[in-house]
């Protein structure tokens, strides 16, 4: 274990509280940390780590306005902070699943040309990806930008938006790795490893946001860098009871993040309801993860990722049924909470959407 300084999110509009933590590291290379479950690398290189500790200053995120020494501190902190939260997220998932997920590669400072990037994404190998490195890990990679723009802070200062300093973005991308190797919404297990699908559906985005909420301990997962967006605005992506299937759009042209907020919000409601019965929150989390795993493994009669097979995997009701099968004792509580978001077993997303909208117009007309 190596002592490290990292952000622990505290629900306030800042990246988190700086805390000393311990990181399980196998190898410390100049710009890379090799962990048992992941490798975290700053692709911009240089000498970031030359000692035996990982105690760095976040230096306001570093960036183009910082001097070279401050930017180096901020980058070293970014790799450390990312490694800590990736390890924490992967260990959380493997403890509930009872086995580890495949080794995850995380590359920081990616896609910074021609414009700086403050986002993250999860990528699997596919020949048509012309703007990605040639050799992507078949198990999947998280790419984080080098940062772009500034997040205003309440005290009037500003923070360079480096995604490696943003715990919510890190956890969300690990969530896609979890989805790929459990629910496998795109049936990638039936495709050649070098020709996988990177398309993300609402369940994928929603589950990644829900995992983020669990790990951050708040439904307002992007409260720091989206703090200027109102909480009722879908772009804030705060998980809340108001997001029901009436707000779901569906279809390939819609933003899967916005549709995913409905699923994430329903999962959050179900988890809170489970806690209200006196049960541990981990019981719902276990049912979800094991449900995802059984939903992914259930390829009965499907040998190819056909349109119909993929469509079936995108149905909220299918994953809900898998959750209730994973823990039948929780089913009544989970079904009640999900129904309040318009999600019920045995109906397509389109049917749930229509029913929720009909309910809504009935209420308005009353
Ligand atoms: Zn995503």
Image (cartoon, helix red, strand yellow):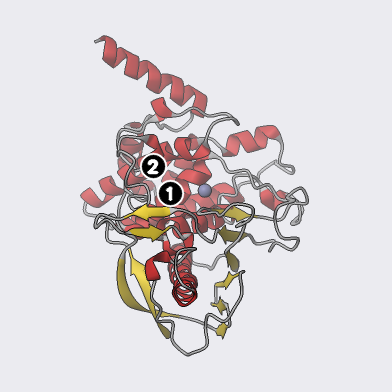
Disc 1 crowd, CA 10 A, few/some/many (<14, 14-19, 20+): many
Q: Which mark is residue 364?
A: none
Disc 2 crowd, CA 10 A, few/some/many (<14, 14-19, 20+): many
Q: Residue at x 40, y 25 (%)?
A: 246
Q: Nearer the viewer, mark 1 or mark 2?
A: 2
Q: Is residue 49 left or right of residue 13?
A: right
Q: Is residue 121 above or below residue 74?
A: above
Q: Which residue is mark 1?
A: 209
Quarter of the picture containing the N terminus is bottom left
113 or 11: which is nearer to us?
113
Ligand 1 contact, mark 1 (Cβ < 8 Å): yes
- Percent of width and height locating residue 157: 30, 59
Q: Would residue 70 be seen by someone viewing this image from the given angle?
A: yes
Tell me the SS state at disc 2.
Answer: loop
Dividing the picture into quadrants, the one containing residue 305 is top right
Q: Which mark is residue 237?
A: 2
Q: CA distance from mark 1 to mark 2?
A: 8 Å
Q: Is residue 45 above or below residue 351?
A: below
Looking at marks 1 and 2 on the same chain, the residue that comes earlier in the sequence is marked by 1
Q: Is residue 283 above or below residue 26?
A: above
Tell me the SS state at disc 1.
Answer: helix
């Amino acid at each position: 274990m190596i002592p490290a300084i990292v952000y622990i999110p505290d629900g306030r509009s800042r990246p988190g509280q700086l805390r000393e933590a311990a990181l399980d590291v196998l190898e410390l290379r100049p710009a890379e940390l090799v962990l048992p479950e992941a490798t975290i690398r700053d692709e911009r290189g240089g000498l970031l780590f030359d000692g035996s500790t990982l105690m760095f200053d976040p230096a306001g995120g570093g960036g183009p306005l910082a001097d070279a020494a401050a930017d180096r501190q901020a980058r070293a902190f970014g790799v450390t902070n990312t490694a800590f939260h990736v390890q924490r997220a992967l260990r959380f998932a493997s403890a509930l699943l009872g086995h580890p997920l495949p080794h995850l590669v995380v590359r920081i400072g990616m896609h910074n040309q021609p414009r700086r990037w403050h986002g993250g994404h999860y990528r699997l190998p596919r020949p048509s990806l012309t703007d990605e490195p040639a050799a992507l890990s078949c198990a999947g990679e998280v790419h984080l930008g080098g940062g772009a723009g500034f997040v205003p802070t309440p005290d009037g200062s500003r923070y360079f938006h480096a995604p490696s300093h943003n715990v919510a973005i890190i956890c969300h991308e690990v969530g896609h790795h979890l989805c790929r190797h459990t629910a496998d919404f795109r049936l990638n297990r039936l495709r050649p490893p070098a020709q996988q699908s990177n398309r993300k559906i609402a369940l994928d985005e929603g589950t990644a946001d829900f995992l983020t909420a669990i790990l951050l301990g708040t439904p307002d997962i992007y409260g720091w860098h989206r703090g200027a967006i109102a909480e009722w605005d879908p772009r804030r992506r705060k998980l809340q009871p108001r997001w029901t299937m009436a707000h779901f759009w569906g279809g390939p042209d819609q933003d899967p993040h916005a549709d995913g907020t409905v699923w994430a919000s329903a999962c959050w409601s179900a988890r809170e309801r489970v806690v209200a019965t006196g049960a541990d929150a981990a019981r719902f989390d276990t049912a979800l993860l094991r449900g995802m795993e059984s939903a992914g493994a259930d390829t009965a009669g499907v040998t190819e990722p056909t349109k119909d097979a993929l469509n079936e995997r995108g149905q909220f009701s299918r994953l809900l049924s898998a959750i209730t099968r994973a823990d039948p004792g929780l089913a009544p509580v989970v079904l009640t909470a999900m129904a309040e978001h318009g999600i019920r077993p045995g109906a397509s997303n389109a049917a749930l959407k229509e029913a929720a909208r009909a309910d809504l117009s009935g209420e308005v007309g009353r």
